[in-house]
Image: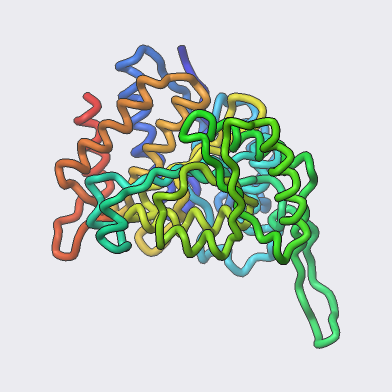
Amino acid sequence: MSYNIAVIEGHGIGPEVVAAAIKVLQTVGKTHGFDFTFKKVAAGGNAIDAFGVPLPEESVKACLDSDSVLLGAVGGPKWDTLPGHLRPEKALLGIRKELGLYANIRPARLLPELKDACPLKKEVADAGFDMIVVRELTGGMYFGESGRREGKHGPEAYDTECYSEMEIERIGVTAFELARTRSKKLISIDKANVLESSRLWREVMHRLAQRYPDVTLTDMLVDNAAMQLVRNPKQFDVAVTSNMFGDILTDEASQITGSIGLLPSASLGETKRGMYEPIHGSAPDIAGQDKANPIATILSCAMMLRMSFGQNEAAQEIEAAVSRVLAKGLRTADIAAPGEAALPCSAMTKAILEELK
């Protein structure tokens, strides 16, 4: 068995964490009798530099021809002054749209070994939490009409939040089905007291709930959800929300696990092909210094093995290897306690590889 992986290394620490993840995939593949063909794809800043656009057609084709996509991180100060349609982040939006990846699955779990890295009160951290946020990925403000115009008080800019019933229903089905495999509890996060798009969101979620009588649905306003994440994260199991709200809330959730460098994600659509990436950014301030945490990207590969390829045993081995390394007290700089020795990215990768072998 061989899998074709389109690889978008990206910028900043992207190439470093992707290189670590590829080594892990190759190692676990040898153990389980499958291998990989990796094809580097230009997208984001390097595509802008080489081709003048963030996502060339040949890059889209390479992703469509792959079994899945592995992404590092995109963006950086070099391209910050470009107009919106030429920024590196446009490559991500384009890939999601072209591949039909409308569901972003972001788990956030506080590992027992990292309770001391959690910034919450000790009693909250001791209780632990294990949640999954299902974020709608191809609708909402990121894809709505936007622009600039002359207003009453001079130049103004606008971005439009728009959702169709179809877009809400398909992400809702994804979340309800996921909730069925866990505690059968689903929290739908919106802003229905203010936004018309959220009122439609809530209507559709309630209608879907009638098809899933075994799942308990709870509504929660997004501002309350932001508060509850730091007050009592254990109450969350599966949550579903819009593109913009999901982007913000999952960054918050990452911090209470100890570091954004720990959280993986999967972007999925109607086919088994997905895009797998850490939720962190390109961190240009530490790029090329061997300081990055590779764990989020490595765990994203575990999600790829499980969700796109059905290689559950291999995925579990990667997750167990990461847990054992952390249990030994090995830490990268982002999760090390003050005064505690921190491993470079390469050494953390080596430690995980040793556990796999």
Residue shown at 39% from the left, 54% from the top: 260
Q: Nearer the viewer, residue 355 or 201?
A: 201
Residue 93 seen by the camera: yes
Residue shown at 62% from the left, 57% from the top: 244
Hey, which quadrant is residue 82 in on the image?
Answer: bottom right
Q: Quadrant of the C terminus?
A: top left
Q: Nearer the viewer, residue 257 or 45?
A: 257
- Given the current orientation, which residue lies at the most extreme bottom position? 153
Residue 26 in the image: state x and y as whole percent.
35, 25
Which colour scheme appears in the figure? rainbow
Residue 346 in the image: state x and y as whole percent.
26, 44
Number of numbered discs visible in the structure rendering: 0
Residue 295 in the image: state x and y as whole percent.
34, 43
Query: Does 184 appear above or below 226?
Result: above
Q: Is residue 181 left or right of residue 89?
A: left
Residue 7 seen by the camera: no
Query: Does 180 appear above or below 227?
Result: above
Q: Nearer the viewer, residue 319 or 118?
A: 118
Q: Is residue 293 left or right of residue 36?
A: left
Residue shown at 52% from the left, 45% from the top: 133
Q: Is residue 101 left or right of residue 74?
A: right
Q: Is residue 142 left or right of residue 89?
A: right
Residue shown at 32% from the left, 62% from the top: 120
Residue 5 in the image: state x and y as whole percent.
51, 28
Q: Nearer the viewer, residue 227 or 34?
A: 227
Query: Does 245 appear above or below 310?
Result: below
